Image (cartoon, rainbow, N blue to C red):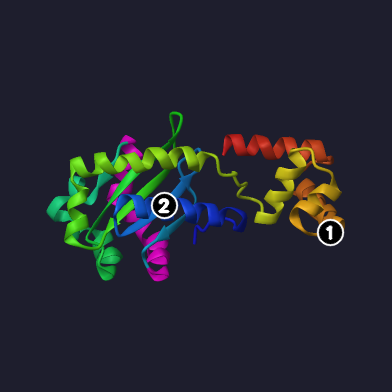
Amino acid sequence: MLAPPKNMRSEFETLADSALRNSGMDSVGLYRFTADRKFDCGVIRGMPDTFVRRYEVSGIPVDPVLADLLETGLPSSTETLLGDRWEKSILFKRVSGEFGLTGFAALPLYDASRLSGVLYLGALTQATKAKLSFRGIAELSIQASALSTALIRLPKQHHALTSRQNEVARLASAGLSNREIAEELHTGEAAVRKHLKALNRIFGTTSRGAMAARWRQDLELG
């Protein structure tokens, strides 16, 4: 699953829960993209875990609404894009229909001009499905504007690293000493030294400063 690292999970879930409350929809999916528009991490609220796993494994590759958003950079929904063809789609037959999803909107999240994520707003009833019209997704896009700002403020993660390695790299990059990193992460200095050694090996560097520079550079590129 594309769950956020532990140090980000509560923030991601808080943002998704807020969107769920404010939108009045039945389910919410919040996903972040890398610079090359691949999924970084995400969370879905209001749907069972079996749906989340099924969508991330089988649904994403055949999701026509997501494909339309990635191509145009504009909001889309099953109602505006597919209409009566929604229940004939591969996504509906393979994933959504089994879980009673009557439709959903996909709203782009931007970091300046870069597409940085997507907000899914799902409908399980005919009443919420009615919100997936052109006018409805225009109104729901207000949710996306607010989330875009919050999403880009979350700490970025290097995909070659574990959550703890990212935390050590981030704190070392900020200039903290081994003792200060250990205190921040509630661990020992020996553990911090072990992580720093692993980070130098991963990045092919031999110093703390060079490692931190490579970590920052990769985040900017990714």
Q: What is the quadrant of residue 147 in the picture?
A: top left
In the rendered structure, find residue 188 and report the number of the disc placed on it.
1
Q: Main secondary structure of the magenta part?
A: helix
Please, what is the three-letter code of the amino acid marked with disc 2?
Answer: Ser
Report whether residue 122 is seen: yes
Q: Give the range drawn in magenta.
A: 48-73
- What residue sits 82% from the left and 48% below the top? 180
Q: Which amino acid does label 1 sit on?
A: Gly
The residue mark sitting in front, 1 or 2, is 2
At 47% from the left and 37% from the top, the residue drawn is 149
Name the mark on residue 18: 2
- Residue 129 in the image, given as x and y percentages of width and height: 20, 55
Is 12 left, or right, of 195 in this rendering? left
Q: What element carries label 2?
A: helix
Q: In this view, does 148 lie above or below 181?
A: above
Judged left or right of residue 94, residue 84 is left
